[in-house]
Amino acid sequence: MVSTQISDYLNRYRADNALADLVTKLSPQSYPFIESLLVELRPSLNYLRQIIVLLLEIAGREGVGTEAIVSVELWQAILAEKNSRKEKQKELRQWLETKRYPLKQALLEELQSLQKSLLTDHGFSMKVPEELEGDNLTLSLSFASPGELKENTERLASLAIDQRLKEIFDLLLGKK
Amino acid sequence: MERVFTYQDIQTVYVSAEAAEDQLSKRILGRLGTNVQIIKYPSSKDPLATSAALEQDARMAEGKQTLLLTRYKGNWLKACPGTARHICCNLYVVNQAEGCPLDCTYCILQAYLRRNPTLKIYTNTENLMATVQQRLEAEPSRLFRVCTGEMGDSLVWDNLTDFSLSMVPLFARLENGVLELKTKTANINNLLTLKNEHQGKTVVSWSLNAKSVTEHDELGAHPLKERLKAAALAAEAGYRVGFHFDPIVHFSGWQDEYRETIKSIFEHVRPSQVAWISLSTLRYHKDLQSIMIARFPESKLPYGEQFLAKDYKIRYLQPIRLKMLRFMWQELKSVAANIPVYFCMESPAVWRAVSGGLPIAGSEIKEIYCVGRAGLCSCNDDLRR
């Protein structure tokens, strides 16, 4: 039996059956955390759905109850920060995504670090493929004169031989 | 302790009116013995058919213990549908049965057959054989690789049906056909009796995996060791053998376990006895995920580092997929450089990234990717796109 506070929330915002069904899959010991989440962060139904799916998947992955995932200390620390409600929501979701997809998050961090350092050194911002699916990097450049284009070409040439660019491809192609 | 499926697990057999007098029905009922409930059934429709989503999981479990003997009225021989924008290995499929009594957590049949979960064996096999023969003889310049393991395990029913006793000699006679029997069992008794008849035209292949995957996610299948022992016996009887690593699963310690399985293969068979080995990482239709979680709450497979791709299939992230495929490819090639290894339903980009080129470049896999008979090769144009 889902707690009254959660039921009221679902009813008030007309949650669909799928979300109501997901809530019932949480352990009852998780309800205090969900209730606190509803009060403190006033999430949209979509956000709530994302958080519950993450909790259930982490629990399945780690073989633990959903109540064991977000500790009281972690939750209090997120709430104590001087961030906006939206930023706190983002922080919680990112923390859960890192726990659910540790390799993906580590890969993204490594890629972002390489992209950032290449931007600093060569001045080009590059995009990796969506969901890391594919082997094409994208960059765009604009120029205001033939001279600027020539300058860009020279910077591109130095980018092409930068070892960090090769590292990005190695990460995408599973060679690292 | 792994529990292997036996025919005693079948509780009920429905016999459709049209199949009642078929010789195969009588043989199956005779071999199942008296502990099974036999129900004469006026229809050929699935007796457990349901469209109610809530009932489907329970029906699926009941379906694994229920068998329908009926006749098949569709097209027996079909090209494997493959996947759009992925390289196709030109396989043909023929299904003498539908549904599988083995209960692999990742099996797509759970989603595909969820509304019609009863196991089915088709009893008009003379018609199947005639259809296959006619089709192959009508196109003598085309090579047909025909597999029976699309809608269920190729050999799981063989001790009831003796299907292999008809199919193997048929393909021995057909010049442009190769039969592949794909299994997770060790049911090769019939095949061993045909050691002087198969003429090398039947490949017996085993689905293999890391030991922990076979133990936790392939319920009812024979343990890895028994599969490999059976492969050794089949190879000794002169059959070429195949192996399918599908699905390759990502988990902590996956390299060690897959390396161990690869090592075990070649402790049982020589590379020269291997017809082919296929590789494919775990992927499944989105609809299967909730079924897996509901039916197998202990399985870790739905919780890997996967994402929902545009084709509505859940796959590991590309860097993980490529790392796994590259590892398997290199481990296999380190044992025998010319062993025929191919990827099942992978993109040209994956072929290039892992094997260094498209499959047509490797002569050892010509048998898989050429649709023409030896000397009459008419290679698959798709590979060049």
Image: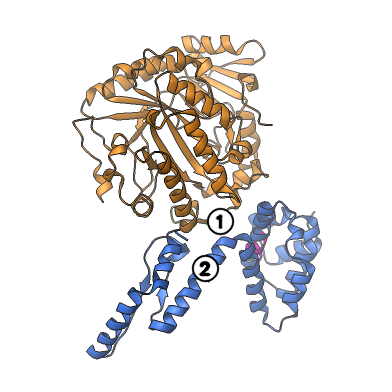
Chain colours: A blue, B orange
Horizontal relation, residue B319 to residue B53: left or right: left
- Residue B300 appears in the rendering: yes
**Where residue B209 sits: x, y (%)?**
53, 39
> Which numbered disc covers residue A108?
2
Quarter occupied by residue B370: top left
Q: Which residue is mark 1?
A: B305
Quarter occupied by residue B65: top right
Label 2 near label 1: C-beta < 8 Å? no
Quarter occupied by residue B32: top right
Q: Residue placed at 44% from the left, 56% from the top?
A: B310
- Residue A17 appears in the rendering: no
Q: Residue placed at 34% from the left, 46% from the top?
A: B87
Per the rendered image, the range of residues in magenta is A48-52
- The amino acid sitting under disc 1 is Glu
Q: Which chain's residue wears label 1?
A: B
**Where residue B306 sits: x, y (%)?**
53, 55
Q: Residue placed at 21% from the left, 34% from the top?
A: B377
Horizontal relation, residue B133 to residue A18: left or right: left
Q: Main secondary structure of the magenta part?
A: helix
Foreground residue among B332 and B53: B332
Structural crowding at the residue carrying mark 2, measured as other residues with C-alpha within 10 Å and reported as few (<14), some (14–19) or many (≥20): some
Q: Is residue A67 above or below residue B51?
A: below
Structural crowding at the residue carrying mark 1, measured as other residues with C-alpha within 10 Å and reported as few (<14), some (14–19) or many (≥20): some
Q: Which chain's residue wears label 2?
A: A
Per the image, label 2 sits on a secondary structure element best described as helix
- The amino acid sitting under disc 2 is Leu
Per the image, label 1 sits on a secondary structure element best described as loop
Horizontal relation, residue B204 to residue B376: left or right: right
Q: Residue placed at 30% from the left, 19% from the top?
A: B133
Q: Say if the magenta span includes residue A50.
A: yes
> Which numbered disc covers residue A19?
none
Q: Is residue B132 above or below residue A17?
A: above
